[in-house]
Image (cartoon, rainbow, N blue to C red):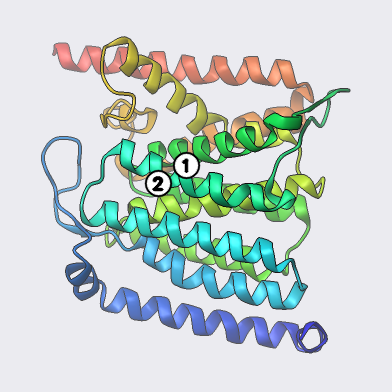
Amino acid sequence: MKNFFGNNSYILLIYFHVILISIVCVIIFFKNKISTYLKIIDYPDNNLKIHQIPTPRLGGLILFFYIMPALLLNYQINSGGLKELIISVILIVVFFTIGLIDDRKLLSAKYKSFVLLLILFLTIPLTNVLIVNTINFKNLDFYINLQQAAIFFTIFSIFSLYNSYNFSDGINCVASSLGIFWIIFVIIKSGDYSNIYYQAIFISLIIISYLNYIKKIFLGNSGSSIYSIVISLILIQEYKKNNIFCDEILFILFLPGIDMARISIQRIISGKSAFLGDNNHLHHLMRPVITEKFIFLVYLLISIAPIFIYNYLTKNFYLTFIFSLAIYFLIYSYLINKKKILEEK
């Protein structure tokens, strides 16, 4: 199989993507019928939701039907570990299904957390390939051996990424463009430009971003859920191959991570549930200041800033972390003050 693909790689890759894009086009063409049948239409509620017309939550479906065949084909091409493949498929299916049910009928945060943490604890320990055993930095001379804490750290990291990515969804193209940035970063760092799985993630996110930009579909909870587990597993595998370091992962995830931490702390201090939805995310605060169709670009630039500062300016973990924090809270303070001024008028 590997030799066959090696001799006909470009032609077969093109055929494969044409087939998958055709499947996506069918989903898009019948988007209203599919979303009505599955009951995954997002209706405006004049409260937390800012869109004005009912919109299909089809992003997860597009991702699922594009990347799953690519994952299986990538396994055939590279002859990877069967156990890791099975675990990845199980996790992707479970995360997608929980997200799809959540799109159809709003699930409680506690129920979702319980199910997802349970499946992570049942599957991740089955293979060492998906467990982060050490914390290794690019420009620091020490590393941390997690030992018995490795499984808990790994699951905590996956679950944190799941929540932070979910928090970033709410304005058109914010979450999908963030996902594009992450997969591009992975492709560049790994140097694996011919990886059909990475290509599938990139292409499907481009399609979703365009449709989201013109307000035809939403990424949906199924989309944010499936992408969060996909990118988590990819980052772990590339990290264990020494293609990406822990500090680089921290900095590409910095903006959604620090925004999630800030919002959760504020909710707890105010006596609210940390999982309770609101419009206090950074991208929501940008609405009075920036035209909505450009918010994702500003959010993306702020997301790229930490890793750019780290790799091209400071090359120092501590300085980059301080600069990134300062940039975030300066922007946040400005947006909050602007919001107060507008509310007082």
Q: Residue furthest left?
A: 46
Q: Residue at x 34, y 24 (%)?
A: 274
Q: Amino acid at mark 1?
A: Leu
The correct choice, above or below, for 234 with respect to 153 in the image is below
Percent position of residue 22, x then y: 44, 83
Q: Where does label 1 land, which residue? A: 117
Viewport quadrant of the C terminus: top left
Q: Amino acid at mark 2?
A: Val
Q: Residue at x 58, y 60 (%)?
A: 88
**Of residues 101 and 340, the one drawn nearer to the viewer in this rendering:** 101
**Discs 2, 1 touching: Cβ within 8 Å:** yes
The correct choice, above or below, for 14 with respect to 300 in the image is below
Total labels: the figure holds 2
Q: Residue at x 32, y 74 (%)?
A: 28
Q: Where does label 2 land, which residue? A: 115
For residue 298, say whether it is visible: no
Residue 85 got which mark? none
The correct choice, above or below, for 331 with respect to 284 in the image is above
Q: Residue at x 78, y 21 (%)?
A: 316
Secondary structure type for disc 2 = helix
